[in-house]
Image: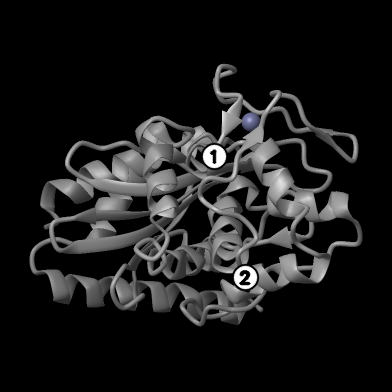
Amino acid sequence: MRKAGSVALAVVCSLASAAFAGTGTRTVQRELDEALAGTNAVAVVLDGGDGRMIAAVRGEHAGQDASAPGSTLKPLFLAAALRQGRVRAGTTVVCRGDLHIAGRDLACTHPRDETVLDAERALAYSCNAWFASLATRFAPREAAAVLREYGLGSRTGLIAGESAGEVRTARSEDEVQLMVLGLEDVEVTPVQLARAYLRLSGELEAEPVLRRGLEGSVAYGMAHNAATAGVEIAGKTGTASDAGGAWTHGWFAGIAEHGAERVVVTIFVPRGNGADAAALAHRFFAEWGRVAG
Ligand SMILES: [Zn+2]
């Protein structure tokens, strides 16, 4: 297994050089390195056009470390539910702020005056009540199938020696809700999540509410730390902890556009939360936005 790990690093390096060749005097790799300097975060950047991995920090971990994805799954389930006719953009849910599922306290953190949410605001504010309600419209096997459709539970082929992550089938309605909230029965690697968002990026035009919700997340919602002047960002944060773990971990996953360039980014903060990951994403977008386009 150690042998596979060293191959992974070699692949990351060669992809970084390939990006250098394609972009002249700058590299996305250097921008990502600078943004994450002094942190223990793991990150992956894919070219939003052809899906190549153009940069990674701690690439071995990006391929091998699978963790609960938290709320980064919400746009995937929303996209599938819209496509399958399970909800509409205008579907509203009343959120009372508190939510308990299987003994877990899943209280929302969005403003309390946002009590009736449609799909856009539920995504922007990462409303657990809205998505727990959405979850009841999926049978356990259907929910697992959504995640597999986005490539979760299987290797991406982008990093050698990577883990396939985990997608299990829930056994009860409570468990489906916890799966949709990214807390149970699903573990993903940073590179898998990037590939899932690459696919999601192709759906933003067909389902405008997805784009509005993810842009709203950065503009006024839970991912606002990622907002960067001059860069269009559709993104989502997640915070979760793994079974038996004392610490939470944080995620940011998103799609950014500047001029003619588009990238898909995931950032994983091993001990932290989604707000921390979004702040690191901002540092990358600020570097990238200065020179992209
Ligand atoms: Zn809520």
Q: Residue at x 65, y 69 (%)?
A: 146
Q: In this orientation, which residue lies closer to the viewer: 57 or 191?
A: 191
Quarter for ligand 1? top right
Residue on which the image places disc 2: 152
* Residue at the far left in the pictured view: 25
Task: Label 2, secondary structure: give it.
Answer: loop
Residue on which the image places disc 1: 118
Judged left or right of residue 97, residue 6 is left
Task: Label 1, secondary structure: give it.
Answer: loop
Residue 37 is at least partly visible in this image: no
User: Percent from the top left, x then y, of residue 181?
Assistant: 69, 48
Q: Amino acid at mark 1?
A: Asp
User: Percent from the top left, x then y, of residue 191?
Assistant: 50, 66
Judged left or right of residue 252, residue 92 is right
Would you place residue 43 above or below residue 3 in this image? above
User: Percent from the top left, x then y, of residue 145?
Assistant: 70, 73
Q: Residues within 10 Å of mark 2 (few under 14, many from 20)?
A: many
Q: Quadrant of residue 22?
A: bottom left
Would you place residue 123 above or below residue 165 in this image? above
Q: In this orientation, which residue lies closer to the viewer: 130 or 55?
A: 130
Q: Amino acid at mark 2?
A: Leu
Residue 266 is at least partly visible in this image: yes
Q: Residue at x 42, y 66 (%)?
A: 203
Of callouts 2 and 1, which one flags the residue occurring earlier in the amino acid sequence? 1
**Image quarter hosting the N terminus:** bottom right
Q: Residues within 10 Å of mark 1 (few under 14, many from 20)?
A: some
Judged left or right of residue 272, residue 180 is right
